[in-house]
Amino acid sequence: DSGVTQTPKHLITATGQRVTLRCSPRSGDLSVYWYQQSLDQGLQFLIQYYNGEERAKGNILERFSAQQFPDLHSELNLSSLELGDSALYFCASSVGRQEGPLHFGNGTRLTVT
Amino acid sequence: KNQVEQSPQSLIILEGKNCTLQCNYTVSPFSNLRWYKQDTGRGPVSLTIMTFSENTKSNGRYTATLDADTKQSSLHITASQLSDSASYICVVSAESNSGYALNFGKGTSLLVTP
């Protein structure tokens, strides 16, 4: 068990809708990262937060947004969903910014129909 | 452009056999190289992290090597077990102005058969 909790595990929604994915980092970790993994694709970095502030941005669409709250949990908001947004969304956490190992949650599987 | 290439894309071996997975990268400035194991439908789990000065690191039956000169790494699995069936991902960290950027390979899918 990595100590990183993601909810929900599965999400099925229709095109055009909006969903929120939630992540609780491992106790003591200040950094939270979001990744997207489409079928047969590698992990694509979306965004990183460190202690409540945005630290780095990857290939995150404008329709997607995220935030990290004072209790360090994070939410990833996906809006105007398209079929191509169907993927596994992983959250990871680390103690510092990125020097050490990342601890991944087991992901949220999003299916857009 | 920072890239991480893994080979082979997939591999099937018999239980008990050894295997070696390869990772070539063009990432700079290099900070560290990591290997992760990802079981189907689960999040990746860290196996090893190696810095520039380390050329080998072991974690049980997993041994990673790093040649920073040729920008190559390998992950050797000894006496494979059925539970080794997973995707193995090579990740190279580059230091940037905003901190560190992780560059992910697409992974090698390993299937260990009885």
Image: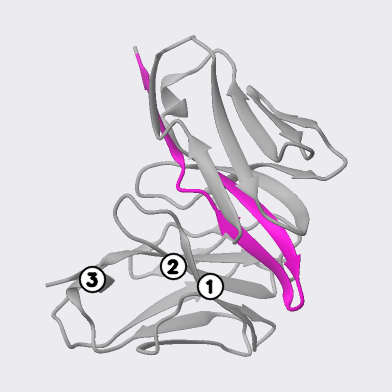
Q: Quadrant of residue B15?
A: top left
As measured in the structure, the alpha-carbon distance from the residue carrying label 3 to the one carrying label 2 is 21 Å
Is residue A51 or residue A61 the one in the foreground?
A61
Q: Dot 2 falls on which chain?
A: A
For residue A10, above or below residue B47: below
- Residue in the picture at 23% in, 71% down: A84
Do residues under tags 2 and 1 come within 8 Å of each other at their CB atoms?
yes
Kindly indicate whether the residues beneath marks 3 and 1 are on one polypeptide chain: yes
Going by the numbered disc 2, the residue's amino acid type is Gln
Q: Which residue is mark 3?
A: A84
**Residue closest to the eye, A52 or A86:** A86
Image depth: mark 3 or mark 1 in front: 3
The residue where tag 2 is placed is A6
Gap in Å between the C-alphas at discs 3 and 1?
Answer: 26 Å
Q: Is residue B46 left or right of residue A10?
A: right
Magenta-tinted stretch: B89-113
The question of residue A78 being in magenta is answered with: no
Which residue does the image show at 58% across and 89% down from the upper left?
A69
Using the numbered discs, state the Cα–Cα distance from disc 2 to disc 1 in whole angstroms: 6 Å
Whether residue B78 is situated above or below residue B37 in the rendered picture = above
Tell me if residue B48 can be seen: yes
Identify the amino acid type marked 1: Ser
Indicate the chain on which mark 1 is placed.
A
Disc 3 crowd, CA 10 A, few/some/many (<14, 14-19, 20+): few
Tell me if mark 2 has few (under 14), some (14-19) or many (20+) residues whose alpha carbon lies within 10 angstroms of its own.
many
A103 to A36, vertically: above or below? above
The disc label shown at residue A24, or none:
1
- The quadrant in which residue A63 appears is bottom left
Q: Chain of mark 3?
A: A
Amino acid type of disc 3? Answer: Gly
